[in-house]
Image (cartoon, rainbow, N blue to C red):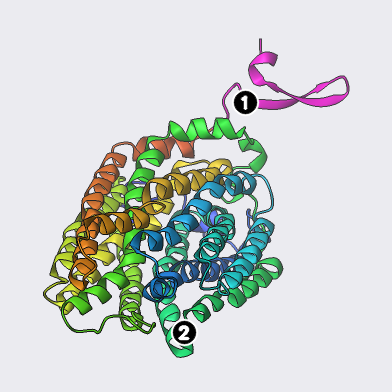
Amino acid sequence: MSLGETTSDSAPFFSDDSEAEEQGGPAGQGPQEEPPSGVSEVRARLTVFILCYINLLNYMDRFTVAGVLPDIEHYFGIDDGKSGLLQTVFICSYMFLAPVFGYLGDRYNRKYIMSVGITFWSLVTLASSYTPKEHFWVLLLTRGLVGVGEASYSTIAPTIIADLYVKGRRTNMLSIFYFAIPVGSGLGYIVGSQVGNVAQDWHWALRVTPGLGLIAVVLLLFVVKEPIRGAIEARSESDLHQTSWLADLLDLSNNHSFVLSTFGFTAVAFVTGSLALWAPTFLFRAAVFNGDRAPCVEGNCASSDSLIFGVITCITGVLGVASGVQVSRQLRKKTPRADPLVCAAGLLLSAPFLYMAIIFAQASTIATYIFIFLGETFLSMNWAIVADILLYVVVPTRRSTAEALQIVISHLLGDAGSPYLIGVVSDALRKTDSFLWQFRSLQLSLLLCSFVAVVGGGFFLATALFIEKDRHRAENYVPTDDEPIVVPKSGRSTRVPVSSVLI
């Protein structure tokens, strides 16, 4: 089948057969009694819906704090550096625990791992809402513990979708899954700021998602069924073999597309992490600087700014993810390098608009919102495509580990430090504590985001050089001669290298 043919909505990832053959037998025949994954079509769709719901809650919880950040600063009397730590401690916890759950997710029942993690996350989030005024460190600690639950979910959920669908259907389901990131983020700002405003207490903003999280656990346990790894791709889980964690890491480090796209996604994480925490506060300070808003003295400071930014984040996220997938799908008809090229274009186009949004904040609020809208739209084009790249350049038995490794690198060098870095640079640039310098110092520090976006675009352009080779290697992967097999020894099974029995 040539690249120009349109028998599928997207370029094939694992075979040249039609999707009808992949999902349930040859075209024109009735569906198989049980799909290769072991999960019925109805339950597979419900599974994706539930995973999307949980992803939405994850990002709602993550950005609820950003929606009420000016109130938190006022309540605890902290500076920008300490405010940035709220996001940094969460990301660090999430980042360092991701490999643990990635290892477990490649070897054990994934829905039980997620259920335990989400239960823990919900309880800790609820506990964080009772932090007393004199103990800011308690809020830091509980926000760090929230990362435990999120790590258990984010490393595993995409691999379940990968074991339910392939080709264009996988891309479509991943698109739906990743719609939840910008929509959930936007809802975090909206729900956080508005609940805090109605209750006249920012603590109540943190009490919305825990109850919804426990509902998600019930849905996971009673509706979701664990799919068979790799079966939907006509590759038996036993045939692929489980290799050691170090062997998995070595293979992934030699996968150029995985490594380069991970560094590109790191730039996305840096920029989104910085904007996610600081954009509402920056917009509030710009309004104070321009004389459009009064200074914060009584709490509920940035409720309107968080509301507007939340709405923008929801809309631009949906537009960005959808347009990224559609542009990539059309471009695949002309080049197999479409995915990394679209990711590169998204970052490179977002950079000038984000720069203008930051610069124009001192002159025109309307212009600032327009440029933020355009910049975030282009930035959101990456989400589903990057996930898809990982899934088709990595073999099924290493995907959770790959997801975890990508999380570690992208957060370690991206949004784990960027909110804190922006806050520290802002504090260092501030000459006085006037409203002018509160705005100007944060404005100058946020300009770093545009530079990082350009660097990330370069990494995705480099990914395009290797994507064909690495996808072909994953599609045609066979165990090497030195991978272990089971042979009898004295009436018992033991694992030995193939080469030792083929001399």
Front-most of 409 and 252? 409
Answer whether labels 1 and 2 touch (C-beta < 8 Å). Answer: no
Q: Which of 85 and 262 is in front in this view?
A: 85
Amino acid carrying label 2: it is Val
**Residue beneath disc 2:** 195
Most foreground residue, 232 or 387:
387
Q: Height in image: 343 above or below 366?
A: above
Number of disc labels: 2
Tell me where residue 126 appears, x and y as whole percent: 60, 73
Q: In which quarter of the image is residue 183?
A: bottom left
Query: Mark on residue 106?
Result: none
Residue with the mark numbered 1: 483
Q: Residue at 55%, 55% (x, y): give it.
A: 151
Instruction: Identify the residue at horizontal 31%, vertical 45% (top origin).
Output: 336
Residue 51 point in image, percent of width and height: 55, 66
Q: Is residue 254 magenta?
A: no
Amino acid at the residue labelled 1: Glu
Decide which of tag 1 and tag 2 comes sooner along the chain.
2
- Measure the alpha-carbon separation of dots 1 and 2: 56 Å
Q: In which quarter of the image is residue 226?
A: bottom right
Across and down, in percent, residue 264 comes to 32, 47
Would you place residue 410 above or below residue 114 in this image? above
Q: Report helix, strand or loop for mark 1.
A: loop
